[in-house]
Image (tube, rainbow, N blue to C red):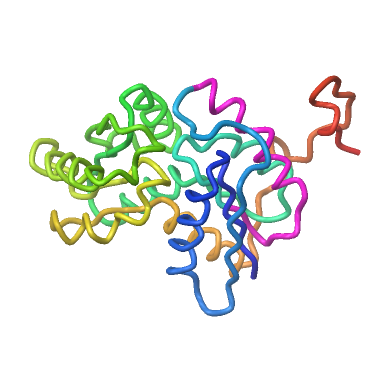
Amino acid sequence: MLIRIVNPNTTASMTEQMGVCAAAVAAAGTTIEAVTSPMGPASIESHYDEALAVPGLLQVVGAGGADGYVVGCFGDPGVDAARELASGPVIGIAEGAMRTAVLLGRTFSVVTTLGRTAGRAWELASRFGLADACRRVRACEIPVLELESPDAFRRITDECRRAVAEDEADVIVLGCAGMAELCARISASIGVPVVDGVAAATKMVESLVALGLRTSTRLEYAPPPAKAYTGLMEPFVLT
């Protein structure tokens, strides 16, 4: 099977990292293809960024050709719209990580990048029915494009350690695709499960495809009705 990991931002190095993390957990016979959005922001750190990231994501998903898709941003931007277009399952990394976390412990805390994104994480936890299990959303105040800085690992690990001690969290969820490669090292350092949403969502998509399951098209996720789109949106007309 082919699983396409779509990075909704335009930073290719982050796409490459996601592809490596997904391929590391993929089963034999599963091909991982990591794709950078053809348009949009360099990173997604606001509602504005998220809104402008969706068209590029939909362009990739709408092209088809994959058995399933992972949306590689913790805000899960455009997942509902992508499910209307995709022929296979679509999972966002926030949903993949949070649902995995509650299989490993009663409680989890999210450790993310900037405090301004915490509200979105809480909103998603509530939507997934997991707000009671989420102890806290913590921010390291490290911009997404600075996650590869020499000091980032220490700061993220310290915040994860505080989450275990102060929040009494059983599990840590890393709240950014750019943190994916740090997962195993942080877990070994703090002694509790640490969930990377890229890997978790990849295995979820893989399992759904293997089970022969796809998104229901009965009502809300049916293909969008055809209509005119104008201006910059004209290329997105569905026929």
Task: Find residue 131 and report its horizontal and vertical position in percent.
Answer: 33, 33
Q: Residue at x 41, y 37 (%)?
A: 145
Looking at the picture, does residue 192 appear above or below residue 140? below
Task: Find residue 239 and report its horizontal and vertical position in percent.
Answer: 91, 39
**Left or right placement of residue 200 versus residue 78 in this view:** left
Q: Residue at x 62, y 32 (%)?
A: 40
**Left or right placement of residue 214 versus residue 32 in this view:** right
Looking at the picture, does residue 93 appear above or below residue 166? below
Q: Residue at x 33, y 34 (%)?
A: 113
Residue 228 included in the magenta stretch of the image:
no
| Quadrant of the rendered image containing residue 193 | bottom left
Q: Residue lying at the far front in this picture: please name it.
A: 150
Looking at the picture, does residue 167 appear above or below residue 97? above
Question: Foreground residue, 163 or 220?
Answer: 163
Question: Foreground residue, 132 or 98?
Answer: 98
Q: Residue lying at the far left in this picture: please name it.
A: 165
Task: Find residue 200 and report its horizontal and vertical position in percent.
Answer: 42, 57
Please give the range of residues in magenta. Answer: 47-69
Q: Main secondary structure of the magenta part?
A: helix
Residue 56 included in the magenta stretch of the image:
yes
Task: Find residue 127 and report its horizontal and vertical position in percent.
Answer: 45, 32
Q: Residue at x 32, y 36 (%)?
A: 112
| Quadrant of the rendered image containing residue 57 | top right
